Image (cartoon, rainbow, N blue to C red):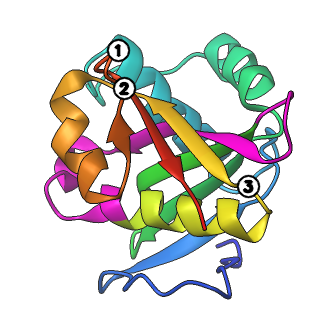
Amino acid sequence: MPTPIVSESSQSPTPEGYHLEIIPDFTSASPHAREVIALNVRAINYDGDDRYEISDEEIADETEHMSGVAFVALVGKDNKVAAVAGLEKSPDSKEQGSVVGVVTSPEHRREGLGRVVVSEVIKLAASKGIKGLSLTSTHDAEEFYTKLGFIPSKQTPWEFTKTLE
């Protein structure tokens, strides 16, 4: 089992039976890389259906797309990723970033795990000097993100922003 890399600034209570792993620069060799990609691909293309097997080609394509993204994963006692969220720094500004790839596996939804990983991504962003975050999600996630301090765009209801202090 890989050694968890836990954020020193972590103040979010990690639910019992889980541990946080921070993957600072995503590559195919990252701990749980295949699981992180599978969760994201299934969420986007297959409504979270974990019966869909992810091909090696999909893994390679997504690994390239996610290269350089920092991920926070919440891993259970079974050493499987239960929830994940990523931080992508803006290529245009060192002070801007995006929250990407927020997914909770279907069997762990409604347990507060998404809140934990997004909260950790916010802390990670602040520790890297990022002053503002954005994200794109579904409109039905508005309540989830507003509880975490994100503000929905007036023009586009699925875009959210958050200013960090």
- Report, in whole angstroms, how far the alpha carbon at label 2 lies from the one at label 3: 20 Å
Tag on residue 130? 3
Asked if residue 43 is positioned above or below residue 123 in the image, the reply reads above
Q: Residues within 10 Å of mark 1 (few under 14, many from 20)?
A: few
Q: Secondary structure at mark 2?
A: loop
Residue nearest the observer in this picture, 142 or 32: 142
Residue nearest the observer in this picture, 84 or 136: 136
Sequence order check, earlier mark of 3 and 1: 3
Q: Can residue 121 be seen?
A: yes
**Residue 118 locus on image (x, y percent):** 45, 57
Asked whether residue 46 is drawn in magenta, I would say no
Disc 1 target residue: 156
- Report, in whole angstroms, how far the alpha carbon at label 2 lies from the one at label 1: 5 Å
Magenta region, residue range: 90-115
Q: Secondary structure at mark 1?
A: loop
Disc 2 target residue: 153
- Going by the numbered disc 1, the residue's amino acid type is Thr
Mark 2 touching mark 1, by CB under 8 A?
Answer: yes
- Report, in whole angstroms, how far the alpha carbon at label 3 lies from the one at label 1: 23 Å
Q: Residues within 10 Å of mark 2 (few under 14, many from 20)?
A: few
Asked if residue 154 is positioned above or below residue 39 in the image, the reply reads above
- Going by the numbered disc 3, the residue's amino acid type is Ile
Mark 2 or mark 3, whichever is nearer to me: 2
